[in-house]
Amino acid sequence: MAIGKVSEATGVKVPTIRYYEQIGLLPPPPRTEGNRRTYDRKDADRLTFIRHSRELGFEIDQIRTLLSLQDRPGQSCGEADAIAKARLVEVKEKITSLKALEAELERMVEGCSHGRVESCQVIEILADHGKCKHHQHDA
C-alpha cells in the first residue's frame, strides 16, 4: 500500500504517518525502487491502534509502551491496565473540573442583569478572579 492509501484506510494523515515513523512508533517501511514507502496490513493495523489511542488521550510514551506490550502478547496485561487506569483518573479529574467550570459559567450568565456593562456580572467576575467560585474550588 502506498502512503496515501494507508492514510485513507486508517484515517491518519500522511505527515502524521511520517512523524510516527520518525519517533519510532511505526517501523520504517520498505521502499520501492522509486524510493516510495510501501505499507502492509500490519502497518495499517498499527496506525489504527495509534490513532485510537491518541483519540482516547494517551500520550506518545504511553502508546509506545502499549505497542510494546501488544508486540509481546504472552505477557501479563498489568502494565496496560495501569496505563489505562491512570488515564481514567485523568479523565475523571478533567470531568470534575469541567463540571465546576460549567457551574461557574452558568452562575455568571444567570447573574447577568442584561443591563449595562458597568453592572455586568460576567465582566465583574472576569475582572476579579477572587469572585470566581471555580477558582476558589481549585485553591
Image (tube, rainbow, N blue to C red):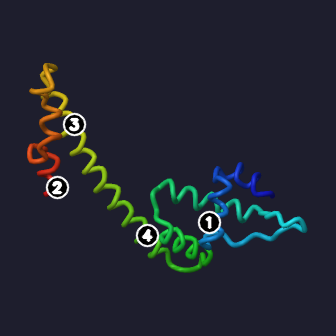
Tell me the amino acid under the disc marked 3: Leu
| Residue drawn 42% across the image and 69% down it | 83
Q: Position of residue 56 (x, y in %)?
A: 47, 55
- Badge 3 density bin: few <14, some 14–19, many ≥20, Cα 10 Å: some
Q: Nearer the viewer, mark 2 or mark 4?
A: 2
- Badge 1 density bin: few <14, some 14–19, many ≥20, Cα 10 Å: some
Q: Are marks 2 and 3 in contact (CB under 8 Å)?
A: no
Looking at the rendered structure, which numbered label has been put on residue 105?
Answer: 3
Q: Are marks 3 and 4 in contact (CB under 8 Å)?
A: no
The residue where tag 1 is placed is 20
- Which circle's residue, 3 or 4, is located before the other in the chain? 4
Q: How many marks?
A: 4
The residue where tag 4 is placed is 81
| Residue drawn 59% across the image and 72% down it | 23
Distance (Cα) linking label 2 and label 4: 29 Å
- Badge 4 density bin: few <14, some 14–19, many ≥20, Cα 10 Å: few
Q: Secondary structure at mark 4?
A: helix
In the image, residue 4 above or below residue 65: above
